[in-house]
Image: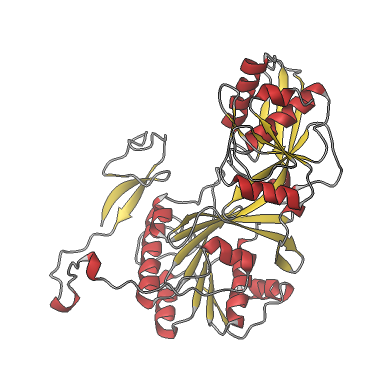
Amino acid sequence: MASSFFCKECGYESSKWSGKCPSCGAWDSLKESTVVVGKKGKQSVGTQAKPERIVDLKAAAVERINTGSREFDLVLGGGIVPGMLTLIGGEPGIGKSTLMLQLSEWMGKLGKSVLYCSGEESMEQIRQRSNRLSVHNENIWLLCTNDTEQIIDLVSDNKPGLVVVDSIQSVSIPSLDSIPGSVTQLRESCNRLLRLAKNENIPIFLVGHVTKEGFVAGPKILEHMVDTVLYFEGELRNQYKILRAVKNRFGSTNEIGLFEMTSSGLMEVLDPNFIFLSTEGNQIGNSYACIMEGSRSFIIEVQSLATGSNYGTPQRVVMGLEQKKLALLLAILEKNLALYLRSSDVFINLTGGIRTNDPSLDLSILAAIISSLKDVPVPEHSVFIGEVGLNGQIRPVSQMEQRIKEAIKLGYEKIYISGYAKTKHKTKVIGLRDIKDLYKLF
C-alpha cells in the first residue's frame, strides 16, 4: 500500500501534502489516503479487452423501471436504469432514509426484490419507521451491517432487483487499515459497489451525508464515480422538500421533484404553484415571477424588505439566491435610477424554500425592491419575467411562451416582459425596455 493525498473539494491527487490545493486553490483540503497497489500481472487471454470501431457497436435501447412516483421518475430522467449507481445527499433529518424506504416499497409492489442495507440503524429502528410509513412489502429484505464485502457477497448470490446502502459513510472494507468514512474507505467501497452494479446490472442507491457547506462528505471524486447525484433540499421545519439532480448520465440535470413530508411519509406535490405562492393578496415588497425548472414552469413569490440600516455597514441577505446576484441588481438600481441604497438594509426571500438561479427572476426582484423602497405595492395580478442587463436594459429569456401560458392559466392579468421579446400573446402582455419603465409603474 502507498499513501497519497486527495483534495476533498475537487478530487485532485498529489503525492505530497500541501496547505493549498494546486488545482482549485482550497486551503487545508488535502487529506491523506491509502492507495491499494497490487502487483502488475499478465491478463488472461479470455478477459483481455480489445478496441472496436464505434460505428460497429450496436446501441441497445435503455430500458427504464418506472417506480410509480411521477416526481421521482422525472428527476431520474424517466425511471431507474438497470446497473446505475446513484448517490443521494441531504442534511440530517431531511428525509433521505424515508425516501429510500418508500422507494423500496414502490419497487416491491412491482415485483422487484429489494435489499435494504443499513449501517447506522438496527432492525428494530427501521421496523418502527416502516410501520409509520406503511412499508410492509414481502419483497423487501433488510440487512444491518457495516461490512461492504458482506453486502457485495450477498448481492452476488441473491441478485436483487434494487440495492440501497444507508449510508456510504457507515460501511467499510475490513481489510483496509482505516476508519469508516475516511477517504480510503469511501473510495474503495464506492469503487467496488460501482463494479458490482455494472457487472450484475443491478441499480444501487447510496445515501450520503453532507458537510456544513452542503456538499456530500468525503472527496469530490465520490461524485465523479457514480452515475447520478441527487440532493434532497428544503428547510428542516418546512414540510415541502425538493429533490434535485446535479449529475445524471441518463437524463437531464434541470428537473426537480417536489414532495411534502407528512406523518405517513413523503407525498407527491401535484401543483407546485400552491407551495410558492401566498394567499394573503397583494402586499408591499412582494412580486411574482415565472421560473423554469427542467420541463416545468411555475409561479413563485419574491419577498423584499428594504429599510434603513442601524449599523455602519448595510446588510445584504438573500434566501434562495446567490449573494452576488443581489449585489449586482442593487448596483444596477443605483447606477441607472440614481437611487441611494448604501444606507439601506436589503433582504430578499424566495418563498417555499426553493433555490434557483433562473435569470428571469431579475425583473421580479427589482420590482419587489422598488415596491419596498417606495412603500407602494406592485400592480395587482401581475407577473414579472425578464433578465436585466448591466445598463438597465430588460432582456428576453428562454421559453417565454411556456412561461406566459402558465401565468395566464393561473389568472394573472398583467404579464410584464422584455419589450424586445417576440410573443404570440397580444393581450395581458406588457413590454418593458428599461428599468426606468419599471420604476414608472409605482
Q: Name the image quarter holding residue 28.
A: top left
Residue 35 sits above or below residue 378 on the image: below
Residue 408 sits above or below residue 337 on the image: below
Residue 354 sits above or below residue 149 on the image: above
Q: Residue at x 71, y 72 (%)?
A: 133
Q: Position of residue 347 (x, y in %)?
A: 71, 30
Q: Nearer the viewer, residue 373 or 120?
A: 373
Q: Position of residue 286 (x, y in %)?
A: 78, 35
Q: Is residue 177 left or right of residue 70?
A: left
Q: Nearer the viewer, residue 312 or 347?
A: 347
Quarter containing the C terminus: top right
Q: Is residue 120 left or right of residue 50?
A: right
Q: Nearer the viewer, residue 360 or 119?
A: 360
Asked if residue 174 can be seen in this view, the reply is: no
Asked if residue 226 can be seen in this view, the reply is: yes
Q: Residue at x 58, y 82 (%)?
A: 110
What colour-coding does the image apply?
Answer: secondary structure
Quarter containing the N terminus: bottom left
Q: Residue at x 64, y 83 (%)?
A: 137
Q: Position of residue 153 (x, y in %)?
A: 40, 79
